[in-house]
Image (cartoon, helix red, strand yellow):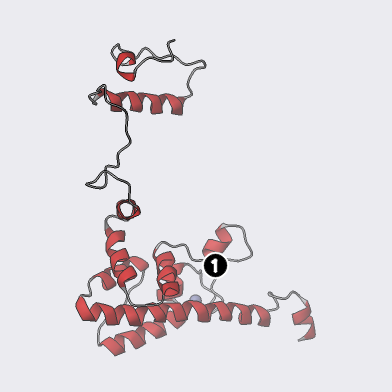
Amino acid sequence: MDTNILVADALRVHPPAISFFRSLEAGEEASWNALVAELKGRSLSQDKDKVTWRLTASQKFSVKSLYEKLTEGNELDMARGLWKAGIPLKIKIFMWQMFRNRLPTSDNVAKRHRPANGTCAICGLGEDANHVFFGCRLARFAWSAVRDTFNQNWNPQTSVDLLNLLSAQRGANARVVWHSVGPMLWSIWTVRFFSNVIFSYRLGRHWGSSVTRDA
Ligand SMILES: [Zn+2]
């Protein structure tokens, strides 16, 4: 076929006057058909081709527009509050990971076939992020302190509950709540990390059987 053919000329006939050296696989064929369908609705001109970005008025790429597209909806609300909160960046990143269930909790570590049995070192129940931050006795104690401090009956059970709780706060109150809850969750997480090490040591898991033999 003519490799210099214009797209407009190739698409003038149906099916398009384009052939391939080898037959397309199922996925490739679907992509090709989608591309042809996409081009069908376009009016082609003799102007020079150019690349434009649909997410900005100026049609120029910006990281901000891409970020907003990727985080639109609920997550954007969360991101607005989170990134605006006057808490240390490391806690913001930690909370972002928590909301997205990306923290190395025991269940997540076990899923990646790393050394972990999926249970909580403090209470022995299954450990996922909701257990760590809302269900475990350490978390329940911390939340009771938060309830007393704010004189509220907050009792989130999942990170979605927490997201709704935080999103509902407005103005100066939102600032205070983020300031309290963020570092509180961070403390739970770091305390658990050291607990894991200590509990493992006591049980002779962390440094092998010599610990239990000497004990
Ligand atoms: Zn627990």
Left or right, residue 64 beside residue 192: left
Could you say whether the residue bearing mark 1 is in a helix, strand or loop? helix
Residue at 30 percent of width and 39 percent of height: 52
Q: Quadrant of the C terminus?
A: bottom right
- Location of residue 80 (image quadrant): bottom left
**Would you say residue 187 is visible in this rendering?**
yes
- Location of residue 163 (image quadrant): bottom left
Query: Compared with residue 58, is residue 19 higher up or lower down, i.e. above or below?
Result: above
Foreground residue, 66 or 134? Answer: 66
Q: Quadrant of the N terminus?
A: top left
Count of labels in the image: 1
Left or right, residue 47 beside residue 18: left
Question: Percent position (x, y) of residue 208?
Answer: 74, 74
**Would you say residue 137 is visible in this rendering?**
no
Residue with the most extreme front position: 48
Left or right, residue 108 beside residue 88: right
Query: Compared with residue 187, is residue 51 higher up or lower down, i.e. above or below?
Result: above
Question: Percent position (x, y) of residue 156?
Answer: 33, 74
Label 1, residues with CA under 10 Å away: few <14, some 14-19, many ≥20: many
Residue linked to disc 1: 106
The amino acid on which the numbered mark 1 sits, given as a three-letter code, is Ser
Question: Percent position (x, y) of residue 162?
Answer: 32, 71
Q: Is mark 1 within 8 Å of ligand 1?
A: no
- Location of residue 158 (image quadrant): bottom left
Residue at 51 percent of width and 79 percent of height: 190
Left or right, residue 112 beside residue 29: right
Question: Percent position (x, y) of residue 65?
Answer: 30, 52
